[in-house]
């Protein structure tokens, strides 16, 4: 797990106030964690604020795993 | 895999709902703005958005009947073709006059109004920042454009401010979209704070007052009026399907460019215009809204009684008193059961399940009407209390 992925795991735990003990880079936010879409969007808002970036809503449609989200974050951070 | 394979999951979900499926409710007979026969049972309607209770108003009904007799059943055409009647223009002028803005544009539905305004205004070089809890029609309208679509945290001007800062120069080509009254939990937008942020970044602000027209503001012009931000908001959109008791939508603005939107708005151009009878009843309802302030006063009396009675029971309610009274329940099964039991006891309300409800919970939503009697509000309190939530 790289640094961005680690930070995302921590943000997920904080944003949703849950332990999520088995998070990996391959964790699927919807299928593995049973998150509702609204919970995913709330988590994304925390990610944006933590990294001081903006993520277009349309780009999230193709994001399922923490690894995919980390790649998107790294591209936005530049 | 066929195109239709995607519906198999939906079919399973629907089967799981069984009879506790709000979409299966049929109004067999509508008796009044607040009563109906459902499944052979006399039912109080407490989830209709019929805020001023005008659906059976004699003046509105008479206006519709006269229009049917004199102008026929429909225009059969777009406003850009044969569907542009003098009544449509008169309604636009009356809306503009009501708001004190120079321009108004009428659409065939409130949904079309949001799609129509957003798709006319936004292009590929632009951005739109939507409140997280904005209605589906606003997200759908944004999706119709090629603008960059972003969200900010619900009712959070600081969250908006950060995101406009991140847009840098693009902030000046950004439309911020919020609602006046949010219809799931009944909370209102902090308008002055949002206006201050958008002005600092040279962005534009659109406010959807679908649930706040006729409900907020001394003259019923919505949260924009009650917050004294009418001179700073750029676009107000709304619907005829709640306080104005019909169907249709509109946009009003202080910007003269609104007059040109009709040449750039596909949801305006490529659909039939509102029926003459709908225009007539809407105009009559707008007149009632303007001349009968006692309707709004009664609506708020009813809302206060229900909200305060439920608050005293320590139920998890929306954050502020409004004619939308929401009870939030963590457990989805409990919410379904409560909704079903209420219906069987003769009370109809709305049920919001995830992902429609904020924060992942479920919501029993009640919308009060000026037409609810004291006895009906008493009955609502009694039947909700009997649920033992």
Image: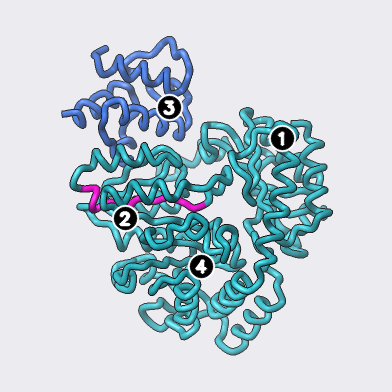
Which chain does tag 2 point to?
B
Q: Position of residue B302 (x, y in %)?
A: 73, 53
Labels 3, 4: front one: 4
* Res B260 → quadrant: bottom left
Q: CB of mark 3 within 8 Å of CB of mark 4?
A: no
Q: Which residue is mark 3?
A: A30
Above or below B186: residue B117? below
Above or below B196: residue B388? above
Span highlighted in magenta in the image = B170-180
Labels 2, 4: front one: 2
Residue located 77% across and 40% down the image: B384
Q: Which chain is cyan?
A: B
Which circle marks residue B303 in the picture? none
The numbered mark, 2 or 4, whose residue comes first in the sequence reads 2
Above or below B173: residue B131? above
Q: CA distance from mark 3 to mark 1?
A: 26 Å
Foreground of the two, A40 or B378: B378
Which circle marks residue B337 in the picture? 1
Is residue B40 something that shows in the picture? no
Q: Position of residue B93 (x, y in %)?
A: 45, 78
Is residue B54 something that shows in the picture? yes
What colouring method underlies this structural image? by chain
Q: CB of mark 2 within 8 Å of CB of mark 4?
A: no
What color is chain A drawn in?
Answer: blue
Residue located 54% across and 36% down the image: B354
Q: Which residue is mark 2?
A: B204
Q: Which residue is mark 4?
A: B248
Foreground of the two, B344 or B166: B166
């Amino acid at each position: 797990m790289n640094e961005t992925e680690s930070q995302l795991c921590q943000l997920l735990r904080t944003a949703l106030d849950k332990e999520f003990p088995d998070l990996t880079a391959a964790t699927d936010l919807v299928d593995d964690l049973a998150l509702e879409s609204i919970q995913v969007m709330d988590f994304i808002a925390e990610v944006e604020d933590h990294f001081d970036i903006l993520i277009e809503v349309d780009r999230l449609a193709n994001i399922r795993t923490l690894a995919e989200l980390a790649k998107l974050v790294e591209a936005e951070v530049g | 895999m066929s195109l239709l394979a995607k519906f198999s999951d939906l079919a399973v979900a629907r089967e799981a709902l069984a009879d506790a499926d709000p979409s299966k409710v049929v109004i067999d007979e509508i008796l009044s703005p607040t009563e109906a026969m459902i499944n052979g049972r006399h039912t109080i309607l407490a989830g209709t958005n019929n805020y001023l209770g005008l659906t059976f108003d004699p003046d509105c009904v008479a206006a519709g009947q006269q229009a049917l007799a004199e102008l026929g059943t429909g225009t059969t055409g777009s406003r850009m073709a044969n569907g542009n009647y003098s009544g449509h223009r008169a309604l636009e002028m009356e809306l503009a006059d009501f708001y004190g803005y120079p321009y108004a544009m009428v659409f065939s539905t409130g949904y079309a109004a949001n799609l129509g305004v957003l798709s006319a205004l936004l292009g590929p070089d632009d951005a739109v920042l939507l409140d997280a809890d904005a209605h589906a029609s606003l997200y759908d309208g944004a999706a119709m454009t090629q603008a960059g679509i972003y969200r900010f945290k619900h009712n959070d001007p600081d969250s908006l401010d950060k995101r406009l800062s991140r847009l840098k120069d693009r902030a000046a080509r950004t439309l911020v979209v919020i609602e006046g009254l949010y219809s799931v939990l009944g909370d209102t937008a902090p308008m002055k704070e949002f206006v201050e942020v958008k002005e600092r970044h040279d962005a534009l602000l659109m406010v959807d007052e679908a649930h706040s027209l006729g409900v907020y503001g001394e003259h019923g012009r919505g949260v924009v009026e009650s917050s004294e931000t009418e001179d700073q908001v750029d676009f107000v959109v709304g619907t005829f399907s709640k306080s104005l008791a019909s169907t249709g939508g509109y946009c009003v603005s202080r910007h003269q460019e609104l007059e040109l939107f009709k040449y750039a708005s596909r949801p305006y151009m490529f659909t039939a215009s509102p029926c003459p009878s709908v225009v007539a009843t809407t105009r009559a309802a707008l007149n009632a809204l303007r001349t009968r302030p006692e309707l709004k006063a009664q609506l708020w009396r009813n809302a206060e009684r229900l909200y305060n009675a439920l608050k005293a029971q320590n139920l998890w309610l929306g954050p502020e008193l409004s004619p939308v009274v929401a009870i939030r329940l963590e457990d989805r099964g409990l919410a379904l059961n409560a909704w079903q039991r209420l219906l069987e006891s003769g009370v109809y309300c709305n049920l919001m399940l995830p992902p429609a409800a904020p924060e992942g919970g479920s919501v029993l939503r009640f919308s009060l009407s000026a037409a609810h009697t004291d006895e009906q509000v008493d009955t609502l309190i009694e039947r909700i209390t009997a649920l033992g939530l």
